[in-house]
Amino acid sequence: MADKDAYDRQMITHRRAFDAAHRALSAELGVLTTTRDVADLVISRVEEFGVDHTLEALVKSPKEFLLDRAPSPDEMKMIGPQVSAAYEANAAMDRLLGEREKELSGGSFKNRPTLLQLFGREVTFDPDGQSIRYNDTGEMKSPTMVTVRPRPKFKSPDKTRER
C-alpha cells in the first residue's frame, strides 16, 4: 500500500459503498421508528456481534434498537443486504487503515499513529493530546469521555462474534 493515491482511491470506493448502504438502511429502518440514527445503532451492533446475530436481534428484540415494531420478513429481505453491505465496506476500510498504520510506523507499534474510521470517515486519534482530527477535512475535535455501564447479558446463547 505504498501508493497513497491507490490507498485514497480504495478508501473512497469503500466509503461510498458504506454511505450508500447506510442511507438505504436508514430509509428501510425509518418506517419502523421515528428515532433518528437507528442505522448507526444497528451498524455498531454489527461491528460488535456480527451480521447474523444483529439481524436476528432486530426481529426478536426490536426495542433494543429503538424500533416501534419488529421488521416483517419482507422488510428483513431489504434490511439484511444493507446491513451486510455496510459491514463489508466498514471491514474493508478497517483493513486498509491497518495497512496504512503499519506503513506509516515503519512496522513499529511504538511509533504507530492511531488511525480509526468512524462511520465512514478516517480520523487520527491522539490520546495524549486528547484530540481527534478528521483526515478528510482537517477538522479537530476534543473527544467526549463518558463512563459506560455494562450492558445486561443477552438472553440469546449465541454471543459469538463473526470476526
Image (spheres, grey):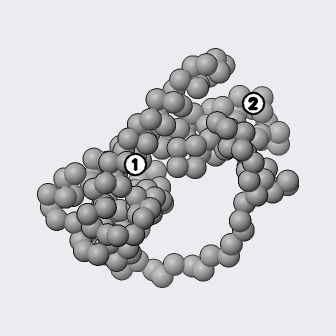
Q: Amino acid at mark 2?
A: Leu
Mark positioned earlier in the residue sequence (2 or 1): 1
Q: Which mark is residue 86?
A: none
Residue 72 in view (yes/no): yes
- In 3D space, how far apart are the residues under numbered discs 2 and 1 (Cα atoms)? 30 Å
Image coordinates of residue 97 in percent, x first then y, are 61, 37
Which marked residue is nearer to the observer: mark 2 or mark 1? 1
* 140 over 12 or under it: above or below: below
At 53% from the left edge and 23% from the top edge, which residue is drawn?
Answer: 9
Q: Position of residue 70 (x, y in %)?
A: 24, 71
Secondary structure under badge 2?
helix
Q: Residue furthest left?
A: 74
Q: Secondary structure at mark 1?
A: helix
Residue 134 in percent (x, y) is at 68, 43
80 up-or-down from 19: above or below? below
Q: Residue at x 70, y 33 (%)?
A: 102
Residue marked by disc 2? 104
What residue is shown at x 19% (from left), y 58% (from top)?
75
> Looking at the rendered structure, which numbered label has been put on residue 22?
1
Q: Is residue 49 visible?
A: no
Neighbor class of circle 2 (other Cα within 10 Å; few <14, some 14-19, many 20+) is: some
Q: Where is residue 34, by image quadrant?
A: bottom left
Q: Few, some or many C-alpha atoms within 10 Å of disc 1 (few <14, some 14-19, many ≥20)?
A: many
Q: Quadrant of residue 3?
A: top right
